[in-house]
Image (spheres, helix red, strand yellow):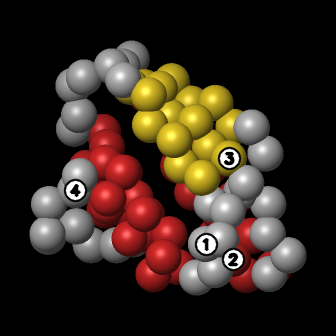
């Protein structure tokens, strides 16, 4: 299944994790941090393609966090046979 993470219009960390929770239908106990994201994603067994769009931001802090998120996604791709990541921008 394809999952699109489009960061157009996303302006803070709360919005990032809100979108991740919505897109991946995370449970209410999701910790809204990169460790929690990794834990929930690495336990998934279904095949998934994750497409990242509009991840370059002018806000330096937000841009750095999105770079960290992309690194986590690439780690997941390397460690989980069922996850493929495509970063468009």
The residues bearing labels 3 and 2 have C-alpha atoms spaced at a distance of 15 Å
The residues bearing labels 4 and 2 have C-alpha atoms spaced at a distance of 22 Å
The residues bearing labels 3 and 1 have C-alpha atoms spaced at a distance of 11 Å
The residues bearing labels 3 and 4 have C-alpha atoms spaced at a distance of 20 Å
At label 2, counting other C-alpha atoms closer than 10 Å, the crowd grade (few under 14, some 14-19, many 20 or more) is: some
Q: Do the residues labelled 3 and 4 touch (CB within 8 Å)?
A: no
- Residue at coordinates 14% horizontally, 69% vertically from top-left? 28
Local SS, label 4: loop
Question: Which residue is labeled 3 in the image?
Answer: 53
Question: Which residue is labeled 1 in the image?
Answer: 10
Question: Please, is residue 72 above or below residue 7 in the view?
Answer: above
Give the x, y percent position of residue 76.
Answer: 45, 36
At label 3, counting other C-alpha atoms closer than 10 Å, the crowd grade (few under 14, some 14-19, many 20 or more) is: some
Question: Which residue is labeled 4 in the image?
Answer: 26
Can I make out residue 2 in this image? Answer: yes
- Residue at coordinates 23% horizontally, 52% vertically from top-left? 25
Give the x, y percent position of residue 88.
Answer: 74, 37
**As drawn, is 83 to the left or to the right of 7?**
left
Give the x, y percent position of residue 26.
Answer: 22, 56
**Mark sitting earlier along the chain (3/2):** 3
């Amino acid at each position: 299944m394809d999952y699109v993470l489009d960061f157009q219009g996303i302006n803070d960390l709360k919005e990032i994790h809100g979108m991740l929770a919505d897109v991946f239908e995370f449970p209410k106990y999701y910790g809204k941090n990169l460790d929690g994201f990794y834990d929930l994603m690495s336990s998934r067994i279904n095949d998934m393609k994750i497409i990242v769009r509009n991840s370059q931001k002018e806000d330096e802090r937000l841009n750095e966090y999105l770079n960290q998120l992309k690194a986590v996604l690439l780690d997941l791709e390397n460690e989980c046979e069922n996850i493929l990541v495509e970063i468009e921008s």
